Image (cartoon, rainbow, N blue to C red):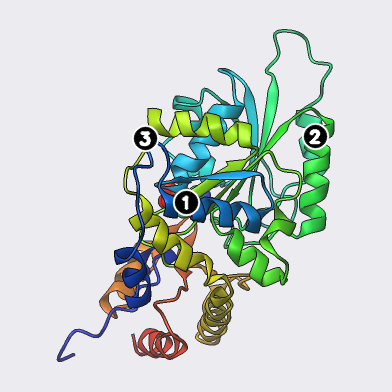
Amino acid sequence: MTSAPRRIDLRSDTVTRPDDTMRAAMAAAEVGDDVLDHDPTMRELEERAAALLGVEAMLWVPSGSMGNLIALMAHLRRGDRFLAARGSHVLEAELGTPAWLAGGMPHPLEWSGRPGRVAADDVSAMAAGSAPYYALRTTLLCLENTHNFAGGTVTPPDEHALLVATAREAGLKVHLDGARLWNAAVALSVPPAALTVGVDTVQVCLSKGLGAPVGSLVGGSAAFVAEARRLRKMLGGGVRQGGVLAAGGLVALSRINDVAADHANARTLAAGLAELGWEVTEPQTNIVLASVPDTPTTLAMLDRVGVPAVAVPGGVRFVTHRDVLAADIAEALHRIKSA
Ligand SMILES: *Cc1c(COP(=O)(O)O)cnc(C)c1O
């Protein structure tokens, strides 16, 4: 090999960089002090996202993890049990903050045959109300759509509605981790609001497939958002002239439908890898999971050919995104074949 090949980075959709259009919007943003009162561009982003997601109000936060944590802090009292699908981001990838900072007792729900999806019966069984006074009190169900570690799997609106109804009937609150809700909505051809029906709170990411450099939003009722603003400040997430960041978020929100191209690229990648004899999942959105016998060796090979991916239990994960084009996927497959 004479010169290093261009890297085709499939580790995550978080590697996306703001393009010229987004940078220009950020440079031109109208700003104010969002900690004192409100930054006008922040407010515009929050209002537009609330309308899109069918909730009363939303709050910009620096990260999805902070958005989830704020929701859990608002919902949980110390020692309350919360339910979440096995492998959920809140269980596996947020440093234990749901327990450490929000005081919750986590309880993983098994996948009900389909990766990343849980059964309504398991929700009601865990929430059984007639337990003695010293039993754990279950107060919250956390959903994740798409489910990241299950391979970007989608929960459709009817199943979402059944889970929410079951949780409500059992007296549970519902938080939706919608870091990639956009991908679910596009894969299902439904508006994002069709996937938030009945939830108390929802968190969405702007900094993944939509390409913003920073930012998530967490929302629900206006009363929740008023409390969330206090919690954000407590966690060090209040920013002042945040309009510079929010302007990138507004451009990101205009690009939701673009993730359809990422989904097509994921299907091409999975089909190509399968042709090369890899054992891969059929992608529902922009994530491809491959089972490999020796993950470190495979990751080292991928890195050597300039197609980095990440380790997941039992294999490797590839994520397609807006900075990787169809031609890059073809090139990636070519390099993997040659290796
Ligand atoms: C990325 C992600 C988050 C957290 O977002 P950060 O901005 O990285 O903190 C939360 N949930 C899911 C499912 C994610 O994929």
* Pointer 1 residue: 216
For the residues labelled 3 and 2, the Cα–Cα distance comes to 36 Å
* Pointer 3 residue: 36
Where is residue 292? Give x, y as percent. Answer: 47, 67
Q: Quadrant of the C terminus?
A: bottom left
Left or right of 77 on screen, residue 306:
left
For the residues labelled 1 and 2, the Cα–Cα distance comes to 26 Å
For the residues labelled 3 and 1, the Cα–Cα distance comes to 20 Å
Which is more toward the observer, 86 or 30?
30
Furthest-top residue in view?
Answer: 133
**SS at mark 2?**
helix
* Pointer 2 residue: 168
Asked whether mark 1 and ligand 1 are closer than 8 Å, the reply comes as yes
**SS at mark 1?**
strand
Residue beneath the point at 50% across and 31% down: 98
**SS at mark 3?**
loop
Where is residue 89? Give x, y as percent. Answer: 52, 46
Which is more toward the observer, 206 or 188?
206
Left or right of 250 on screen, residue 169:
right
